[in-house]
Amino acid sequence: MKKLGIIGGSGLYDIEGFDFVQEVPVQTKYGEPSDSYRVFEYKGVSFYFLNRHGRKHSIPPHKVNYKANIAGFKELGINHIISITATGGINSSYKPGDIIIPDDGIDMTSGRKGTYFDGGLIHHIDITEPFCPIMRGVLENAAASADEDVFTSGTYICTNGPRLETGAEIKAFDRWGADLVGMTLFPECVLARESELCYVNMSLITNYAAGTTDSKLTTDEVVAEMSKSMERLKNIISMIPVYYTENRVCECKNALKGTKISKND
């Protein structure tokens, strides 16, 4: 059976309707992942689901052990990961409930453990395209087959959190070309690339970004919008087995080729 990893963010803690098979705890050399990996089966695919913030959402974005989370997927033999995130809409074309498949990102985080190569063996990986193009195509085809409208491009800017952004920050991000804002894309996508895994993001716009409306931002609206849109996300995920293959024709599997700069063996 084919394997596929899913990382769930704020408001997405389960995959309802899929057959639950088992729960797999993993201990990595980078520590414990955010939660056990719960395995669900559907149409010939084993979905390995991980709660990014823990099952009770007890881990804030700047404290997530991203290194352990990605390493855990790799130890389980999973080469493809779909990341699902709740985000704020900067682009005026977006409204709450819209689903975005980003094609680029900006990292504004600080203090996070963002690389596996922080001493001794050093690689400088290419992150020109943060997301696997093949997996982006899988999501786009799945959304079309599910008859769900999605935006198939967008730049995700990742802030440190846990606070929300100021209005002036959002204005600056808008001028930089950012379309949506969240707190968990980095270093997750970088660590997946360093691990030579295929990684893609699907973001739900749960609120308008700070300063773009007169309304006060609350986490209640984030969770409420995610809950309201769960059926749409599930519709897309349910069509993934039609297009998903474990054959790797992209360059993600060769991400470390030609990137080593240290002299260590």
Image: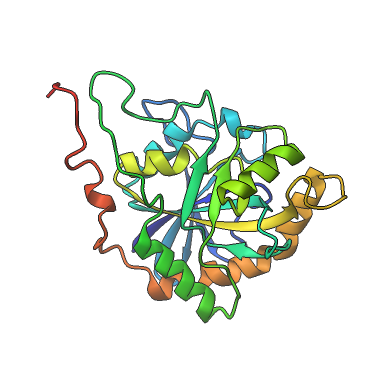
**Residue name at image x 72 percent, y 32 percent:** 163
Q: Using residue 260 as the reference point, say whether residue 128 is left or right of it.
A: right
In the rendered image of this protein, does residue 167 appear above or below residue 244? above
Instruction: Locate residue 66, reporting x and y percent.
Output: 47, 34
- What is the basis of the colouring in this image? rainbow
In the rendered image of this protein, does residue 241 appear above or below residue 81? below
The quadrant in which the C terminus is found is top left
Tell me if residue 9 can be seen: no
Q: Using residue 110 as the reference point, say whether residue 46 is left or right of it.
A: left
Q: Using residue 202 as the reference point, say whether residue 264 is left or right of it.
A: left
Foreground of the two, 149 or 64: 149
Instruction: Locate residue 206, reporting x and y percent.
Output: 72, 55
Quick one: which residue is furthest to the top in this view?
A: 120
Instruction: Locate residue 24, reporting x and y percent.
Output: 45, 43
Tell me if residue 204 can be seen: yes
Q: Using residue 43 as the reference point, say whether residue 12 is left or right of it.
A: right
The quadrant in which the N terminus is found is bottom left
Foreground of the two, 1 or 165: 165
Foreground of the two, 61 or 98: 98
Instruction: Locate residue 21, reporting x and y percent.
Output: 48, 56
**Residue name at image x 52 percent, y 23 percent:** 111
Q: Image quarter for residue 71?
A: top left
